[in-house]
Amino acid sequence: MMQQHRYYFLALATFSIAITTTILGFFTTTISAEEIVVDAVVEKNDMATNKSTQNDEADKNIAYDGSDLIEWITSNGGFIHPNARIGLDPTGQYRGVFVKSVGGEEGGTEEGIEEDELVATIPWDLIVKPNNYDYHGYISPNCDALHEMYHQFQLGDKSKYAPYINYLINQPAGRIPSEWSKHGKELLSKIMKDLPPYNDALHRYERDWIGQCHGEDTPLARQSYFQLTSRDEDGLMVPFYDMHNHSNDPKRLNTVPHKPKKEGRPFTMRAIRDIAPGEQIIISYNRCHPCWFDTKYDDCETRSHGGTDFLFSQFGFVEDHPQFWYIPQYNEEDGSLFDEIRFCLDKDDETGQFFVTRFGDNYSDEEEEIPFDENVEFLKGELDRLLQLEYDLKNDGELIKSMPSYEWDMTWTYHDAIFNAISAAFEKATGDAPVFDSKQEPAPRTSDDDLKDDSKDEDIEMAFIEDVIAPVEDDSDKDSEDEPSDDSAVDEQQESEDDSDLEDSSSDDEGEMMPPRILKGAEG
C-alpha cells in the first residue's frame, strides 16, 4: 500500500497548463495491445511512459481537500472522524491526512483524536476488491484485483466508486522505479547490482500485468496497475485509508488498521495513542516487518512485512528510521539461496549516527544472526563498489540531464540509504568502522541546479506528496514502496547496454515521474 520521498511543490501558476497538457498527452499516447512479448513491451513502454510522464507530473489534486470523498463515504454508511482532514501540511509542502487545528477555518476541537478512537470505518461496498478475497491469503500478482481496478478506471464517472476512481485517475505518474525512464532505470540497476530490490523490480508492469495477468497494454491500464500496486491493502483498494503517509517511528506512528476478516465487513483504523490537533495521522505500510517495535501486535495476516528496499521499489520512497534491511546471499555457481543478512537499522536523533539494533528480527527468541565471515566480506565489497560509483557518476553532467530530476535524486537517496545501512551492519558485525581507499572519497555534492536541464523536468519537481511524509531533500530520513521472475531476456539486454547507455546519456527518453500512492494511504 501503499509510501515515502523527495517531493517538490509545483508552482500554482503552471498548474492549469500542466493539467491541459497532461490530458492531451494521456489520451494521445497509444500503444499496440497485440505485442505481448515482454522485451517488446519494455522497449515500447519506455518511449510511451517517458513521453507521457512529462505531462503527467503535475498533481491535479494539489489543492484537493477530499470533501467529496468524505461526503461519499459518510453518506454511504461509513465514518470519518470529524477532527480528521485531508490536505496540505501547514507549510504547504506535502499532502496527507491531519487532525484539524482548533478553531479557525478548520474548526477542530481541543481533544483531537483520542487513543483507541475510530479514525475511519470504510464499508465493504465502497472498497474496490477482487472476487477472490481471502483474509489469510495473499496472491502476487493478484490478477483478479488488477483487472477489476482497470475495469473501474475504464468506467470512470460511471463507476460506482466514481469519487474515488476519479481521484486516482488524477494522480501523477513516474514516482515508482518500475515507471521510470530508460536512463533512470539503468542508473538504479547499476547501483543495485547484487543488492535489493534487484533488477526484476524495475519490470513489474511487464512481468505481472502483461506477462502473468495477460492484460492489455494501454496508458490507462498502466496507470491503474501502478495505482493499485502502490496503494492496495492485500488486494483491497480502501478509499481515505490509502491517503495516509507512512512512518515506523514509534514517536510518529499513531494508528493501526484492521482489514475485514470476512467479506461484507468494513475496513477500520483506530488511534493507538492520542493524536493532537494539527498532528499528521500516520500509518505503516509494512507494520509486520521483523523490526516492528510492538511485539504484541498480532494483526499481521498481511503481506506488509517487506523491508526498506521493498517500500522503495513498491512506493518510490526511502522510509525514515527505523528501517529493516534484508539482503539475500546467493550461490554464484547455481544461484541458490544459501544465507541471508537481516538487520534492524536506527538513527540517533542527536548525533545523526546510524546503528544496527539487531541482526535477525525482534520476534525471535534466538540469539542474533551475526553474519558469517564471507557475508562480512560481501558487505565490505559492496561498500567499496557503491563508493566508487558515487565517485565516478555523481557529477556526470550528461547523465544528470538524461533523466528527470526526481529519478536522479531518488536513485542517490536510495544509494545513500543502503550505503549507510551496510556501513552500520559492517561495524556491528566486526566492531570496526569500514575503512576506504583514499581515492574512493565521495564526489563533492555539486548543485544539481547547475547541471540539470530544467526545461524538461520542471513538472517533475513535486514528488509523491501524499505517501511522502516529507519533501525530498537529503537522505533517508524523509517521510513519505519481488520475487525474481523470468526476465532473462530483458536483463541480458539491459546488462549489455548498461555501460554504454550510462556514458552516452543522449536524452532519448523524455522523462517520467512519480508513483501513485507513495502514501500507502492515499496519495501516494
Image (tube, rainbow, N blue to C red):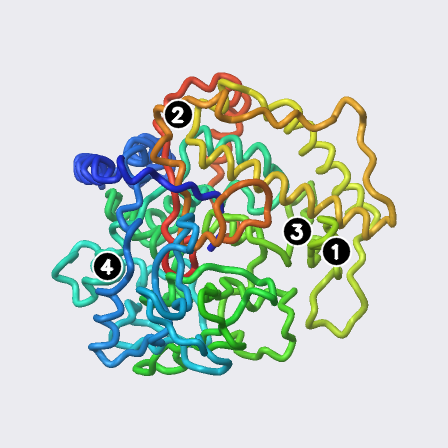
* Marking on residue 165: 4
Query: On the rendered image, what quadrant is the N terminus found in?
Result: bottom left
Q: Which residue is mark 1?
A: 356
Residue at (25, 42) in percent of width and height:
219
| Pointer 4 local density, CA inside 10 Å: few below 14, some 14–19, many at least 20 | many
Circle 2: residue type:
Asp
Residue at (45, 69) in percent of width and height:
277
Q: Position of residue 205 (x, y in %)?
A: 37, 46
Q: Which residue is mark 2?
A: 454
Circle 1: residue type:
Val
Residue at (32, 30) in percent of width and height:
47
User: For the residues marked 4 and 3, what is the alpha-carbon distance in whole angstroms?
Assistant: 38 Å
* Marking on residue 328: 3
Residue at (31, 45) in percent of width and height:
59
| Pointer 2 local density, CA inside 10 Å: few below 14, some 14–19, many at least 20 | some
Mark 1 and mark 4 lie on one chain; the one further toward the N terminus is 4
In the structure shown, which secondary structural element does the residue marked by tag 4 occupy?
A: helix
